[in-house]
Image: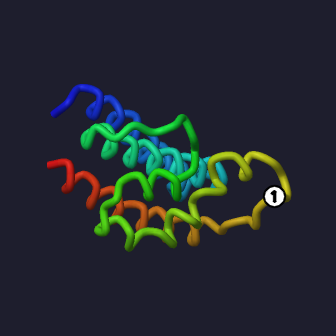
Amino acid sequence: MNPSVQLWLDKAEEDWLAAGWLLEESSPVTTPALFHMQQGVEKLLKAYLVSKEIEFERKHDLAYLLILTKDNRLGNYRDLLDELNPFAVEIRYPGDLPLFSKNEARQLLQRVGELRNDILSFLG
C-alpha cells in the first residue's frame, strides 16, 4: 500500500477510536465524538483519493471529497456525509447545531463504521 495512503488511514483510525471511547458508557461527552466521526470519515475519503492519485484541496467538506471520488459505491453514503459535514467546524460553537443524545451519536457511529468498512475494503 502507498505509504501516504497508510498515513491517512492511521490518522482516520485514531479518530475512529477516539469517537468510540468518547461514547463509552462512563464518558459524559458526545460533541467531541461527533467531531472525531467527521474527521475520521474525512481522512478515510482522503486516503481513498490518494490511493487513486486524485488531488484535492485542503477542505473539510465531505460532499466535495465524495464528488472527487467519482465512485458510485460511495454515493449511497451521501446522506451520512451531509449529516457529518457540520461537525467539522460548526459543532465547535454553542447553539449552532442541535444536541445529540449519546444513543443518537452511537447510532451515527455505527453508520460511520459501515462506511469505514466499505472504504477499507475498497482499498484492499
For this view, does 40 lie left or right of residue 100? left
- The residue drawn where x is 31% and y is 46% is 48
What residue is pinned by disc 1?
A: 96
In the image shown, does 70 or 44 lie closer to the viewer?
Answer: 70
Which quarter of the rendered picture does the N terminus lie within?
A: top left
Q: Position of residue 93 (x, y in %)?
A: 81, 48
For this view, does 89 lie left or right of residue 82? right
Identified by mark 1, the residue type is Asp
* Residue at the farthest top position: 3
In this rendering, the answer to whether 52 lies above or below 23 is above
- The residue drawn where x is 42% and y is 61% is 112
In the image shown, does 5 or 117 lie closer to the viewer?
Answer: 5
Q: Where is residue 66 in the image (x, y as percent from the top left)?
A: 43, 57
Q: Which colour scheme is used?
A: rainbow
Secondary element type, mark 1 = loop
The number of numbered badges drawn on the structure is 1
In the image shown, does 12 or 106 lie closer to the viewer?
Answer: 12
In the image shown, does 26 or 60 lie closer to the viewer?
Answer: 60
Q: Where is residue 38 in the image (x, y as percent from the top left)?
A: 53, 51
For this view, does 3 lie left or right of residue 20? left
Circle 1 Cα neighbour tier, 10 Å, few/some/many (<14 / 14–19 / ≥20):
few
Q: Where is residue 44 in the image (x, y as percent from the top left)?
A: 37, 46
In this rendering, the answer to whether 40 lies above or below 3 is below
- The residue drawn where x is 48% and y is 43% is 18
- The residue drawn where x is 14% and y is 49% is 124
* Residue at the farthest right position: 95
